[in-house]
Amino acid sequence: MDPELIQGLVTVAVGAVAGGITNAVAIWMLFHPYERRGIGRLAIQGAIPKNKARLARSIGRTVGERLLTPEDLAQRLSAPAVRQAFDTAVGDILDGILERERGPLRDQLPPDLATTVDEAMAGLAPRVAGRVAAWAQSEEFERLATGWMARIRDEVGDRPLGESLTEGRRAALKGNVQSWVSRMAEDDELERTLRGFVERRLEQLSQDDTPLLDRLPPGIIGALEHAITDYLPMALERLSALLADPDARAMVEEALRKAFDNSVRDLLIHERILARLVVTDRTIERLVDGFEQEGFDRFAESLAQPEMKAQVTRAVNDAVVNFLRQPLGERLRRFTPERRDALAGTLGDWLVRVARDLATRDAIARTVDRALDAVERRTWGDVLGAIPPERLAQALAEVLASERGQRWIEESVAQVAARLLARPIGRPADWLGAESGAAIRTGLSAAVWTWLQDQIPRVVEQIRVPEMVEQKVLGFSTQRMEEIVRNVTQRELDLIVRLGYVLGGLVGLVAWGVNALLA
């Protein structure tokens, strides 16, 4: 074969191989080696791994500033398709809230949250009561309550009470009063209250050194004296009738014998003997017979004489005054603990019986009837004008600030909270009705969408797209980036290698032609 032709073929082949291998190595060195290898200036690393940070920053800046700007995000989020999807989502949420049948609120809460709510409610009641009590003692409450009372009096002052007190309300009021009185009468708390009142009153009286005479009304002493004086003749007549009783007669005779025996002991011997001979048991019996037959009657007749009656009156007056001059506390202090407990028990039993007696309840019912009859003839102004608004406000403040008032507020708050948690919620759509439900859906969706559109620019500004893309690119491994690039551009990379072969062959052909011309 012609040597020149062989030389030309070799030159073209070498050029083609050199071009293809060069392009293949160049493509390989885009990613390899992944890590820097070699010594000093001879160390090499793939172009993409070496410039990965700069490449990530450039990609992030390009995407954030050219491809996906905040304006693009805001515009995309405001698109009609997004609005339609948003309205659908809001409608589904409202359907789940309004159309679903729900039981008590407590059952809708998780167990842990229900326990937390119970603890919060338990702590809320005392705080509310304390706040109300503190507010009731402030000047603001007094001013508001006084103004409120005055406005009510001005508005309803001329209205008759009979307009508000219908037959049904009157019957209900009487029934409530009777029920309240019955419960209170049978309650053990009433008995404890009455017995406690007796104990406290006796304790106060035992410390009181004021004479009983100073405590009684002036006219009662004269009436008491006159009654005792008039009763003495009747008492004597009763005594004469009492001696007809064998037991009473025996006791009187025994008392006379003891009195006679005690008197005889002080006599001389001969006087004592003579007295024994004269005064026998038969003598005492005849004496008692005389008292029974006419002794007490004559004594009573003597008391009716003016002179005797005046003396008896003076004696009774002196006795009554001497009795009343002694302080009641001194008399009570003389009582033994047992006697004092017996007195307190007796008084307490009496008060409890009076409070629980049916006659007491009937009297209260009649009093309520009379009060209602009297109230019907009056106006609201008469009732409200009887007490100044300032006094009513002060009384209300005292009630709210008292221990009982705070306890009532605590119980009321606890009861309201318990009822709210235990009450079935039901189907909210039934409360609202079809028109209200549709209006809520439309209005809420529009309001939330408008609010969301106002928030989108501020939210989008907080989205750092370049930084996010840069971090994502840096987070990719070089091997993964190579796989992504090769999966997308493998055909183009293969074409580049083939073009290297072709271009290398053309370079070899040109070199051979130049050599041939020069030769």
Image (spheres, rainbow, N blue to C red):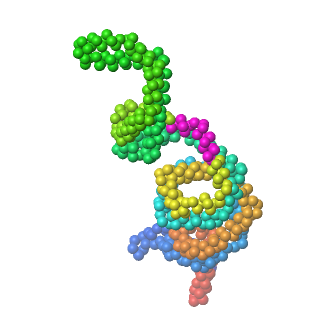
Report if residue 88 is visible in the image.
no
Q: Is residue 91 left or right of residue 301?
A: right
Q: Quadrant of residue 23?
A: bottom right
Q: Hey, which residue is sitting farthest bottom in the picture?
A: 518
Q: Is residue 289 left or right of residue 72?
A: left
Tell me where residue 510 appears, x and y as whole percent. Answer: 61, 84
Secondary structure mostly seen in the magenta stretch: helix
Tell me where residue 38 appears, x and y as whole percent. Answer: 42, 70
Tell me where residue 477 appears, x and y as whole percent. Answer: 52, 65
Q: Quadrant of the N terminus?
A: bottom right
Q: Quadrant of residue 157?
A: bottom right
Identify the residue at horizontal 46%, vertical 28% (top origin). 301
Q: Quadrant of the C terminus?
A: bottom right
Q: Hey, which residue is sitting farthest right in the picture?
A: 434
Report if residue 282 is visible in the image.
yes
| Residue range highlighted in magenta | 351-368
Q: Nearer the viewer, residue 14 or 341?
A: 341
Q: Nearer the viewer, residue 453 or 226?
A: 226
Total number of numbered labels? 0
Identify the residue at horizontal 69%, vertical 56% (top origin). 162
The image shows residue 102, relative to residue 387, as above or below, that is above
